[in-house]
Image (spheres, coloured by chain):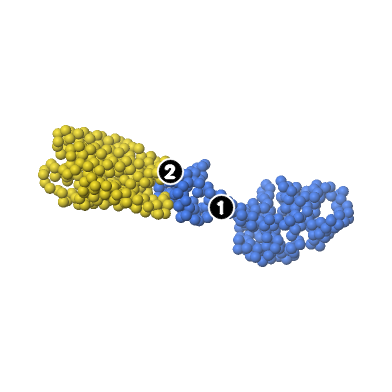
Amino acid sequence: MGENQGLLEHISPSLMGHLLAALPRRDPVAESVQGSLLTPDLIERLRGEGFCGYALARFSGEERGWLAFYRGRLLGAWRQTTYGHLAGTVAYRALRREMGLATLSLYRLQPDDLPPLVALTQGSLRATWAAASNVVTADLMDQLSQEQFTGALVLEDGLVGRAWFFFRGNCLFDEALPPEFHEGYLHLVQAPGQAPADLLEQAQQEDQAQRSSRLSVVWSAVQEVLKEYMGRGASSALERLREIYTTDDPTALEKALRQWLTESLEPNAATLFDRLLRPTL
Amino acid sequence: MAKSMRAYGLLGILWLVWLLGLLGDSYARNLAVSLSNFVGAYALWRVAALSPVILRVALSGLATGLVFLGIGDLLFTYNEATGLDTRAIREGIYLVGVTLLLLMGSLLPFRMERQGLYPLGFALRLALLAGLGGVLLSALTTLIRPLSLVELIYAVVAFYLTLLFAQQTPVLAGGRIGRYLQEVVWALVLGSLARVVYVLGGVPPAQWSIVAYDVLWMASMSVLLLGTIRAPRNL
């Protein structure tokens, strides 16, 4: 695991879900609406408006999902699953796919509130499993204030837990630390020094890379079929076909080429093409 | 396979009939050559049925053209056997056959180009080169012996088709389409040689040229039949 995984590998998914569900809800944009409303259009709108805040999705079985927006950029995504959790673009894709099954709430926050929140899933770990009873709250506060700490402090005692968020040494959301901790363990994560990559852009780049890779697989399969039928003329035929079929949608290209192979060569050519594309068939 | 074997048996009988006709100086020789055209047409249809879609129309068209040549040859045989002049009708049928061969043979590269198997402009380049070569070779042939207009047309078409298909051989080498066409190319080469031999034979044709023409033409049909066995089977 890399350094900037926040508490993903240190606290349970249910505790993470509990902490995210307990985030401040002072400025709701939408509450408990149908998850299917989180369309690509809405995401584009949030992006365009420079939205700061988070979206919380509730699935059946107390599973949760979370998206954090900072000035329109998607900096965090997290999805609780039955036996674990997903983060980053994988979580974002899972949420987009399954949002229809969830209820969605959207809350606005101040831009300065976001870095400590993002620290939960992408911060660097400063301390973990520190016995809470040994920590002197006043000393801890002094230290965090002195170093102008930005991040999150999480108290874990069994499944119940609590989080306090700091921006430049100040406690956010009017939630001060208790005078002393009696039990449990403390985790301290610091917000990433640089803003994490925009997950939306990253997802788009991944989509593009996946499309390119699939397109290259499709063209390779056609090249093999052409070699079988055209022999030495396969490369010039491939070049010509690339000029004719210019789509960058792999599914549409696959369909068009399969039809072309059937109509220009024979159904067996299309079968060979399918076998090359899916060797397990 | 059984059908091909039967066709081979028939072709064997035709070769035998041709030999007996040659020895006995009878019209049986012409009959054998005439019927061999139908065996060639059958072979082309068989290969067309087995081959990729792109070749089917062209190969079937060539087969149909051969049928017309066969009918023309049969009329010639009838002429020889009965003394009844069939020249006028025969020439018309030959011309239809040759036109079909010309059009269907030319169709192939253009169809390949339209479907994206050849680069743009490639078919036209092939056709122009083949046309030019056909005219040049026919002009050279005319130097040997002046040809009538009809004979000139036959020569141009034979040379044109041979050059057109031969130019495609290197592009298609190593592929299934090339394997379907290789016997057609050989048959066209033999057919063209037969035309040259026919011209060299003079008027009236010398006995050696008649024999050589028959052998080349029937060999051409035999090669087409060989194609039905050598054609690649389904993947």
Q: What residue type is labelled 2?
A: Gly
The residue under label 2 is A231
Callout 2: SS? helix
Q: The yellow chain is which one?
A: B
Report x, y in % for residue B192.
27, 44
Is residue B200 shown to the viewer in this render?
A: yes
Asked if residue B137 lies left or right of residue A243, the reply is: left
Asked if residue A204 lies left or right of residue A280, the reply is: right
Report x, y in % for residue A36.
61, 60
The answer as to whether the residues below labels 1 and 2 share one chain is yes
Q: Is residue B8 above or below residue A92?
A: above
Front residue of B7 and B168: B168
Report x, y in % for residue B93.
21, 50
Callout 1: SS? helix
| Residue in the image at 67% along x and 50% along y | A86
Q: Which amino acid does label 1 sit on?
A: Arg
Dot 2 crowding, Cα within 10 Å, few <14, some 14–19, many 20+: many
* Quadrant including the N terminus of chain B: top left
Chain under disc 2: A
Report x, y in % for residue B140.
27, 47
| Residue in the image at 43% along x and 46% along y | A233
Lower position in the chain sequence, tag 1 or tag 2: 1
Palette colour of chain A: blue
Given this view, does label 1 or label 2 mark the residue nearer the observer? 2
Is residue A154 shown to the viewer in this render?
A: no
The residue under label 1 is A211
Asked if residue A18 lies left or right of residue B144, the reply is: right
Q: Is residue A181 above or below residue A69?
A: above
* Quadrant including the C terminus of chain B: top left
